[in-house]
Amino acid sequence: MAKKNKKKRSFLWWVWRFIKSCFFLTLRTVLFTVMLLLLICSALWLVFLKTFNAQHISELITDELQKRLDRPVAISSLDLKFINTVELKGFTVVDTEGAPGQALLAADSVTLRFKLLPLLEQKLVIDEVSLNAPRFSVVRGKDGTYNIPQIKTAKERSVYVSELTGRTFTVSVEDWTLKDGVISYKDLASGVSHAIYKLNLHFERLRFDELSRFTADMVLRNKWDGNISDMEIKGSGHVNFAGFNWNEFAVRSLRAQVFLFQKPLSVLLDLDNLRTPYFNARISVPSFESKDLSIFKTEGLNFSVPKSEVTAKGMLDKNYRLVRLNQAGVSAADVKLDARGTLDFSSPAYTADLKISSNFFNLEGKNRYYAPIGKYKLTGQASVDGQVTRTDGKYALTLFTAQVKDASGDIYGFKASGVTGEFQAKKDFSDLYAAITAGKVVVSDSVFDKLNLSASWRKGNLYAYIASTELNGIPFKMSLSVNNLKSPRRRIRTAIYLKHLDPMAFIGVVRDFVDVIVPLIPRGVKFKAPVEGDLAWLRNFRDRLPGFMPNFAGSLSADTFSSQVLSGNRFNAEFDFTGLRAGMKSLTGTLEARLEGGVIHQMEKLAEEQRALNVTFQPFIIMHRMERAGSFKVGQVLKDVPFTEMASSGHFASGRMQINNAYVVGPTISAVVSGWTDWVSENFDIIIGTMFSNTSRSGALAENLTDESGNPALSFRVSSSMLKPKLEMLRAKKTGATVRAAQDKGLETDFKTGQEFIQGDFHAKK
C-alpha cells in the first residue's frame, strides 16, 4: 500500500516539475526578447546619434524651410526627447510683406517622431510632424495682395547626408498634425478681421501631389455689429496640395459638421483651385427658430424654418472677393428655391445681383413658420421669382413675381377664393402689376365672381381693368385710373359697364368698398350716421360720399336700367366732377345721361310717398280728377308710363346743378325740364313742360291745359324747399315746340367713349 502511494506522488511531482520548467523557460524567452529589442533600439539610437547631429539637423531644417518659403526661419533649440522623437522649440517664420518683422507662423514647438527600423536601410521615415500651438497670421494689404508665400517643392526626393559618417538617408514624412492652432486674418484696406481658434488638423500619409486623407476641428470667430460669435466646425475629407500649385489644389468629399444651431449643420464640399476656387457644396440645415439667430439682432421677429437642404455650385474670383453662384438651391418642406448670381466684396460697399425662383408650393400651413400670416387664412398654391441687387450700399428688389393657383384668403377684408393669377413688382415695389384670370372676391356683401382683372401701379398712378366678371350675378366690366394717388388732388377716371344697372344697388357696392377700406386708413374716416325719413335717399348719399375721389370723371353704361322711379334700356352717362366730397359743397362739373325705351313707374303711388315727387306729379293728379271730361285715359298716365328717350345735361357749381337741357319723348308723355337744383341747401326752381298724346273721343280741355297744337299739355314751376315745395301752373301753349327744340338740341356728347370701352380691351401693361 505504501509502495502504491509513492508511485502516485511521483506522478504528481513530475507534472508540477514540468509546469514549473515551462514557466521559467517562457520567462527567460521573454526577457531575452526584450533585452534583444533593447539592444537593437540602443544600437539604432547609437546609429542615430552617430549619424544625426542635433545642431546640423536644426540648421538643415532652417535652411530647407527658408528655401521653400522664401521667408526667414528661426529655431531656438532642438532636443532629442525620446528614443524616436525630436522637438524643435521656438519655431518661427518671419513675415516680410503683410506685417514685416512679425511672425507669419509661430509655434511653441514642432515635434518629429520617426521610425527606427528603416534607419538600417538608410531611410529616415518621419512617422509624424506635430506643430504644437501654431499661430498663422494672414494679412491682406491695401493693394489687395496677401502675405502668403509661394511654397517651392523639391523636384527630387529629399535626402539627408550625415555630417559625421557621410552616409546618405532618404527622407519621407507620413503624417502631419496641427494641435491647438490659431489662424488670424486681417484686411488692412477695410479693417475687417476674422479668426479660427482651437484648430486641430491631422493629415494621414500626406503626399503633396496626390489626394491625402485629413481630419479637422476648429472654432470660427466672427464679429457682427458688435456681437462676437463662435462657430465650431468638425470634418474630414481628402486634400491634394498639387505640389503647392494652387491652381490645381483640390479638396474632395469634405464632410463637416458646423455647430451653428442646437443641432449641427452637415456639409459636403468639393473644392478646386485655390486662386479662383470652384466649389460644390451640399448643406443639411436642421430646423431652427429666430431666437437661434439672435446675434443678427432678430428681436421682434418670430419665425421658424423647417429642416432644409442647401446646395451651391460656383467659383470665387478677385482674391476671394467675388462669388459667382452658377447654381444654388434650397429645399425646405414643400418649398424649393433656385438661385444664381454674383456677390462682389471687392469694395467696402459690396455689390450683389441674385436671381431667385421657386416651385409651386402650398400656402396652407405656412403660418407654422411665420405666425403673422395666419390671419390671412391662405390656401392654394404659389410660386415666387425675383431679382435682388445691391449697389451703392443699398439693397434693391429689382424684380419680384408671384403666381398663385386656386388660392384663397382674407386680405384686409377682401375675401378671395379660387383665384389664379400673377403679381409682379419692380424697383423696390415702386412699379407693380397684378392679373387675375379666374376666381371670386367678396367685398362685404358684394360678390365679384368669374373675375378677369389686371392692374398696375407706376410713378404714383394706379390703373385697374376688369375685363369681365359677374357683380352679384350681373355681368360687369370696368376700367379705373387714378393719377397722383397719394395727392389730395388725385384725379380718378373710370369707365363702367353693367348688363343691368340698379342705381341703389350700385351705390351699395360703393358703400361696401368704403366699409372695407376705411378701417385700413390709419386716421380713419368719419361719416354722418345714416338717417331715415324725408329725403333720406339724398342725405345719406350726399353726406356719406368718400373723400378719396375729389376729382372724378368717366362713363357709365348699362344694357338695362331700373330704379324705383323709372326703368329702361341702353343707359349711358358721362360725368366730370371736381370737389366730390361729403356734403357736396364744393361739387363742380358736368353730367350727361340718356335712357332709351323705358317706363316711368307708378306716379300716383310715388307722389304719396315723396313730397317732392308729390308736387311734381300734382298736375297729373289734377288731370286725373278731370277724367270725367273724357279728354284722355289718365289712368294710364298715373300708373306705368312708357317713353322712347329720356336725356339730361347738367352743370354743377358748388353743389348747385344747372339744367342745361333735359327732355323726355314718348308715345304717351313728352316733357322738357329747365331750371336748377341745389343739393346742398335742398331747394330747387324747376320748370316742367309736359305734353300728352290726345286719346280723347269727346270732351274738351281748358286753353291753359293744351299747347298750340291742341294736344293736352301742362306747364308748371316747382320751387322752394324740397321738403315744402311750391307749385305754380304756367301757360302750356309752347310746350310741344319746347320739347321738339330740346330734342333737336340733344346732349353735348354722343357717348362714344362708353361704347368704345364696351367693345375694347384695355388690359394693364406689365
Image (cartoon, helix red, strand yellow):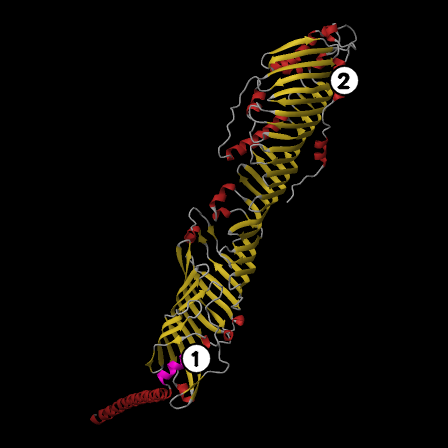
Residue shown at 55% from the left, 60% from the top: 324
Q: Few, some or many C-alpha atoms within 10 Å of disc 2 (few <14, some 14-19, many ≥20)? A: some
Quadrant where the N terminus sits is bottom left
Name the element at disc 1: helix
Specify start and end residues of the magenta stretch as a single range: 53-62
Amino acid marked by disc 1: Glu
Q: CA distance from mark 1 to mark 2?
A: 119 Å
Residue with the mark numbered 1: 64
Report whether 600 appears left or right of 384.
right
Amino acid marked by disc 2: Arg
Residue with the mark numbered 2: 740
Q: Nearer the viewer, mark 1 or mark 2?
A: 1
> In the rendered view, would you say 212 is above or below 394?
below
Report whether 697 appears left or right of 763.
right
> In the rendered view, would you say 745 is above or below 132?
above
Assess whether residue 86 is covered by the magenta stretch.
no
